Image (cartoon, helix red, strand yellow):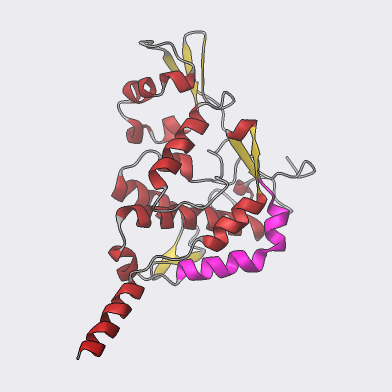
Amino acid sequence: MRWVFCCLALLLSLSSQAVDHGPWDTLLKRHVVLLEAGKASRLDYAGVAAEHRALRAYLSSVSAVKQAEFDAWPKAEQMAFLINAYNAYTVEKVLTRYPDIRSIWDFGKVFGNPFRDEFFSLLGARASLDGIEHGILRKRYAEPRVHYALNCASVACPMLREEAYSAARLEHQLEEQALRFLSDRSRNRYRDGRLEVSKIFDWYKEDFEPREQYFARYAKVLGMPPGAAPRLTFLDYDWSLNDSRSSSPR
């Protein structure tokens, strides 16, 4: 009887064990190119394409996770899993057309929309990038810093991190991503009494409310004087592919 109990306990333990993000971590460490002192990055898509089999194997393990397994994980494990899945599937989507792609919107904004297209399986069902971001992450966890972690394969998007997200380091990783993005003067800056920020803060306004208090929290990072009440403006969004190759089309 004890033997049966031990076997059942082991099986339950294994069933609730999170997916191994090591292969994705290895790809990121090899192919993410840091820029602007680590405030931005580009991805060597050609390098990832050369290791496409490894990416597909990782995504296969991600797609194999069932809803019941996912539900048994702690919150941080769930969030790290979803962020990694979003970023890895975005890269996979780009690679289906690479190198003949200038922007992720080359797939289409109505037909073929890359964010709404259910081109993969996740948690036992067909899924889309929007489904991960809006249907699960934003809806369930109410954590605005996920916007700094999700990468939409575009120059203006918060940088693709040079490592996979993990439950143990998630808080540190999310806060560092926030500091990196907000301190990047090409995308967020205080100038002439105006706070010029990314369109992300317009598109997802409700996630950062009250925005005045949110920006005040990061005033030093933004280069904003303490107590300032600047007029808020939003910068144009560059959807060019975040490819590291200087010869890539723009």
At x 62% / y 31%, what residue is drawn? 37
Q: Position of residue 69 (x, y in %)?
A: 33, 69
Judge whether residue 58 can be spotted in this image. Answer: yes
Q: Quadrant of the C terminus?
A: top right
Which is more toward the observer, 220 or 10? Answer: 10
Residue 45 colored magenta? yes
At x 44% / y 72%, what residue is drawn? 64
Q: Position of residue 221 (x, y in %)?
A: 47, 22
Q: Is residue 80 left or right of residue 157?
A: left
Judge whether residue 233 can be spotted in this image. Answer: no
Which is more toward the observer, 43 or 250? Answer: 43
Q: Position of residue 163 (x, y in %)?
A: 54, 50
The residue stretch that appears in magenta: 43-63
Q: Position of residue 45 (x, y in %)?
A: 69, 53
At x 42% / y 58%, what residue is drawn? 81
Q: Quadrant of the N terminus?
A: bottom left
